[in-house]
């Protein structure tokens, strides 16, 4: 029985921004509720649907990203940005990778409008008091007293007549951020920096702390050139900071999603390469491994032998004993093959009652000895077979060893021919394919 797939360590619903996972074809793997609400669809019904068909991402950029992933050339490590069909929304596309670093799909994160607006707001910032969400302040570097325009009180929830501080410059700054602000002033005064710039939290009237960005320059010096006054502006960047925190969390979740996706892909590959009845590798896995090992053996002087194994009179066994007993019989044979093999050997259920074994680094003598041990072990099982002339469960085996310059298909054909020669010879026998015409003596 195949075990249940482990549950994820997190759920997409925990991610605060609309998020979607796709596979390498651009088909949706999973979305969170925020994404489903954004596109007006049911989250549970979106899996398997192609992203492009939904028109959710700018087609040119999205198609380029998918083509790059499919060709094995991953996009830049920097996020790819593209506009969707909704006005003012932007998507960040990042690569989901498996454990070996290979692209496995895309993570698509939809940004809030504020994340894009902030950069434009910052570029438009000026020292003018009229700018929305800003105020001007001036610090007397000699007396360490500060003057602020009325905008700062409104930004922090105070009325113009409220007394929120005693004109001490950093009294409204969060204790953990005061060293940041004071350090920026010291760098400006010492000449280490040409401009004052600091981001810190200020106490709101409701008791919360909000993020602000201040920038300024020296506007007055004494006769000896020492700074006397700093003029600066402050703007509210609290929403931007919250967005950055959300993005940081989302990207951390994205990394976890990538890890989980790689784990699920690995599990899917494992399941797709495994025979459900015997737990051996299946024919799909054999096709890949067989050609790979033949290619490796062709490059090095290593021997490679292939064994094709067939359970004798299995149809009669199934008809007499029933399919449940037949399945159990195949499991016993598979267990014998697995126990008889070394870690580097490859054992698979080739199909029906037929098995295949690849023995890397094994010449004809080693392969024949292995086949003999398998036959002897199965005979010792003493599994009754009333419709076999031997009265018990037996197998027939064909063995072929790769010859110089031989193709994978030719090796398989010789092993298969050897197996059928063993069956034609009366079954319960072993036949080794000769390197030239004819067969070696059967066992």
Image: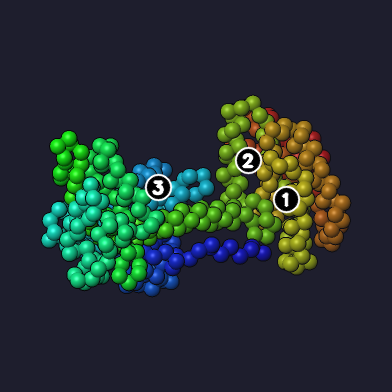
Is residue 298 found left or right of 151 in the rendered image?
right
Residue shown at the point (27%, 66%) measured from the top left: 164
- Per the image, the residue denoted by label 2 is 412
Q: Position of residue 355 (x, y in %)?
A: 69, 50
Quarter of the picture holding the C terminus = top right
Residue, disc 1? 310
Horizontally, residue 260 falls left or right of residue 321, namely left
Mark 1 or mark 3: which is in front? Answer: 3
**Residue drawn where x is 23% and y is 58% of the image:** 235
Question: How far across and how far down the image is residue 46, in percent?
Answer: 40, 68
Against 204, residue 90 (above or below) is: above
- Does residue 219 appear in this view? yes
Say which mark, if any, is on residue 70: 3
Query: Where in the figure is residue 79, as x and y percent of width and height?
Result: 34, 49
389 over 101 or under it: above or below: below
Q: Secondary structure at mark 1?
A: strand
């Amino acid at each position: 029985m195949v075990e249940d797939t482990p549950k994820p360590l997190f759920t997409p619903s925990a991610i605060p921004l609309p998020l979607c996972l796709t596979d390498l074809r651009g088909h949706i793997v999973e979305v969170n509720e925020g994404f489903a609400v954004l596109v007006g669809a049911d989250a549970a019904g979106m899996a398997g649907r192609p992203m492009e068909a939904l028109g959710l991402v700018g087609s040119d950029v999205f198609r380029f990203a998918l083509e790059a992933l499919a060709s094995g050339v991953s996009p830049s490590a920097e996020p790819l940005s593209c506009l969707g069909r909704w006005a003012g929304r932007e998507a960040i596309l990042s690569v989901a990778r498996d454990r070996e670093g290979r692209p496995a799909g895309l993570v698509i994160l939809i940004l809030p409008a504020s994340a894009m607006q902030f950069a434009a707001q910052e570029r438009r910032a000026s020292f003018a008091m009229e700018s929305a969400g800003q105020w001007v302040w001036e610090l007397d570097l000699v007396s360490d007293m500060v003057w602020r325009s009325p905008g700062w009180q409104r930004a922090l929830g105070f009325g113009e007549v409220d007394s929120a501080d005693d004109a001490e410059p950093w009294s409204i700054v969060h204790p953990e951020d005061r060293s940041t602000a004071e350090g920026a002033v010291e760098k400006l005064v010492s000449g280490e920096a040409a401009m004052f710039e600091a981001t810190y939290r200020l106490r709101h009237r409701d008791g919360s702390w909000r993020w602000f960005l201040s920038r300024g320059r020296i506007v007055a010096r004494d006769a000896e050139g020492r700074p006397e006054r700093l003029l600066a502006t402050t703007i509210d960047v609290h929403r931007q900071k919250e967005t950055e925190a959300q993005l940081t969390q989302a990207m951390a979740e994205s990394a976890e999603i990538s890890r989980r996706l790689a784990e699920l892909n690995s599990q899917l590959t494992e399941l797709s390469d495994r025979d459900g009845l015997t737990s051996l590798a299946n024919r799909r896995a054999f096709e890949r491994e067989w050609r790979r090992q033949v290619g490796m053996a062709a490059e090095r002087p290593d021997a490679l032998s292939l064994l094709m194994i067939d359970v004798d009179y299995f149809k009669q066994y199934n008809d007499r004993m029933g399919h449940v007993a037949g399945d159990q019989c195949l499991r016993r044979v598979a267990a014998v093959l697995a126990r008889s093999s070394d870690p580097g050997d490859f054992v698979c259920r080739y199909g029906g009652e037929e098995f295949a074994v690849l023995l890397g680094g094994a010449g004809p003598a080693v392969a024949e000895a292995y086949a003999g041990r398998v036959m002897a072990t199965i005979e010792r099982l003493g599994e009754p077979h009333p419709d076999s002339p031997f009265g018990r469960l037996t197998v027939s085996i064909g063995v072929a060893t790769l010859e110089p310059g031989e193709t994978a298909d030719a090796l398989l054909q010789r092993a298969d021919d050897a197996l059928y020669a063993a069956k034609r010879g009366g079954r319960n026998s072993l036949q080794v394919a000769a390197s030239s015409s004819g067969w070696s003596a059967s066992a």
